[in-house]
Amino acid sequence: MRNKAFRLNEKEFRRFVKIAKPIAGDEKVRRMKEFIQHGDKSTYDHCLSVAYTAFLINRRLHIGAKEESLVKAALLHDYFLYDWHSKGDKLHGYHHPSIASANAGSDFDLSEHELKMIETHMWPLTLMHIPTSRAGWVLTMADKICSSGEVVYSRYSTIREKMNPNKHQ
């Protein structure tokens, strides 16, 4: 049985959905489904995973970050709306936080705090853009956790397919 600490209870999940749904259901945000983020995971699914993970971390570690701001920024942290793989942008990791922040600020009513969380989520890669709030640090941590898992799973899937070319599991 999975540890209950690593998932939301029903009441918490309803709270998460109530906060996330207005942004996650927006047609502009749903465009992120068209772009791959890591492995075969869409940018939309990645952002949803990051938002869920950030909400969970904030709750389980009693960090006290404002949940609404945390979830909104997490859902929009990669709102750059282009395929960074096909562009061959080797500096995508450095540039996309400011692009995502500009897009999010243009399309949604976000506070300066929420925009700052989006702009700093790639720390330490963007060395001079350091998170300045509890919510910013939680978002940064959740993004690293989810990204690492997505990349490792994608690599593992590729290795598994090469090791067992006739098996589809």
Image (cartoon, grey):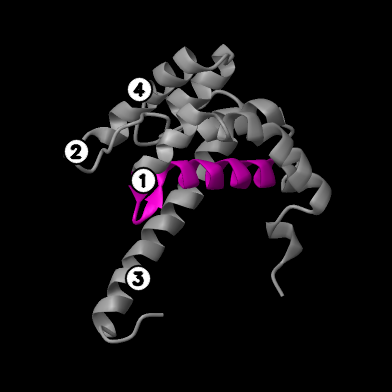
Q: Find numbered disc 2 in the image and state the secondary structure of the residue it sits on.
A: loop
| Residue at the disc numbered 1 | 37
Residue 37: x and y in percent read 36, 46
Label 2 amino acid? Lys
Q: Which residue is drawn at 59% across and 14% down?
A: 111
The CA distance from mark 4 to mark 2 is 15 Å
Marks 3,4: beta carbons within 8 A? no
Q: Find numbered disc 4 in the image and state the secondary structure of the residue it sits on.
A: helix
Label 4 amino acid? Ile
Main SS class of the magenta portion in the image: helix
* Residue 64 appears left or right of 102: right
Q: Residue 99 carries which label?
A: 4
Badge 4 or badge 1: first in the primary sequence = 1
Badge 1 crowding class, 10 Å Cα cut-off, few under 14, some 14 to 19, many 20 or more, is: many
Residue 147: x and y in percent read 43, 50
The CA distance from mark 3 to mark 1 is 16 Å
Residue 3: x and y in percent read 72, 66
Point out the stretch of residues depicted in magenta: 36-58
Label 1 amino acid? Gln
Q: Which mark is residue 157?
A: 3
